[in-house]
Image: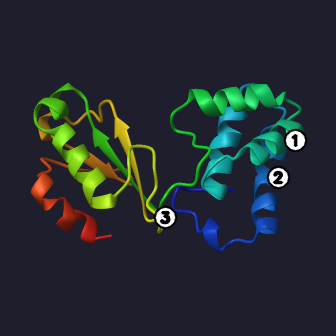
């Protein structure tokens, strides 16, 4: 069974989500080093990892809550807050920064009315920062749900966002 980032989990009931998660936990709980995989799957199903869910995973995997919470807080991929349907990541690596990445970020904050790490009220967009996406020749760059947009112009950001 596979859960992708494009999972239709939002349409699932809480009972269906829990059953799906339980199946994964059962497959992984006795495998050394499987906590990150289970957390990745859980975030794919629920969209985020609130403390209540972290406690449940810890209990089911016979691990201390502190271990689960420590992994969640250490890795930037995991979030304890709901994310929007579209995650916008602005690259602020050296090349992107020098070529206007900060201006892109500031313009997105203005357009969306949120700060880094926040989600719009309609749960459509979440704004994040990346240190480098490995596309320095395309700077400045952003990603929206992992699709790279190259040589982004702050004045054309509204047009890009209107596609969503």
Q: Residue at x 30, y 51 (%)?
A: 109
> What residue sits right under mark 2 in the picture?
22
Q: Pick the quarter of the image with the N terminus.
A: bottom right
> Is tag 2's residue or tag 3's residue first in the polypeptide sequence?
2
- Mark 3 is surrounded, within 10 Å at the Cα level, by few (under 14), some (14 to 19) or many (20 or more) other residues, namely few
How are the colours assigned in the image?
A: rainbow
Percent across and percent down for residue 98 are 12, 30
C-alpha gap between disc 3 and disc 1: 30 Å
> Is tag 3's residue or tag 1's residue first in the polypeptide sequence?
1
Q: Residue at x 27, y 65 (%)?
A: 161
Percent across and percent down for residue 48 are 62, 50
Which label sits on residue 123?
3
Q: Quadrant of residue 82?
A: bottom right
Q: Residue at x 80, y 42 (%)?
A: 57
- Mark 2 is surrounded, within 10 Å at the Cα level, by few (under 14), some (14 to 19) or many (20 or more) other residues, namely some
Q: Does any portion of residue 101 appear in the rendered image?
A: yes
Badge 2 vs badge 3, beta-carbon distance below 8 Å: no
Indicate left or right for 95 with 15 as reference.
Answer: left
- SS type, badge 3: loop
Which label sits in the foreground, 3 or 1?
Answer: 3
> What residue sits right under mark 1 in the picture?
60
Percent across and percent down for residue 4 are 56, 56
Badge 2 vs badge 1, beta-carbon distance below 8 Å: yes
C-alpha gap between disc 2 and disc 3: 27 Å
C-alpha gap between disc 2 and disc 1: 8 Å
- SS type, badge 1: helix
């Amino acid at each position: 069974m596979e859960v992708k980032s494009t999972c239709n989990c939002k349409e699932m009931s809480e009972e269906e989500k829990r059953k799906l998660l339980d199946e994964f936990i059962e497959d992984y709980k006795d495998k050394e080093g499987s906590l990150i995989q289970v957390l990745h799957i859980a975030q794919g199903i629920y969209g985020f990892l609130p403390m209540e869910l972290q406690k449940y995973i810890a209990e089911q995997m016979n691990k201390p809550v502190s271990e689960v919470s420590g992994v969640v807080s250490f890795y930037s991929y995991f979030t304890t807050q709901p994310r929007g349907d579209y995650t916008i990541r602005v690259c602020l690596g050296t090349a992107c920064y020098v070529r206007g990445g900060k201006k892109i970020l500031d313009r997105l904050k203005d357009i969306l009315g949120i700060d880094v790490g926040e989600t719009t009220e309609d749960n459509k967009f979440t704004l994040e920062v990346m240190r480098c996406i490995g596309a320095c020749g395309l700077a400045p760059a952003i990603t929206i749900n992992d699709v790279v947009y190259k040589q982004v112009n702050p004045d054309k950001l509204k047009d890009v966002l209107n596609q969503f």
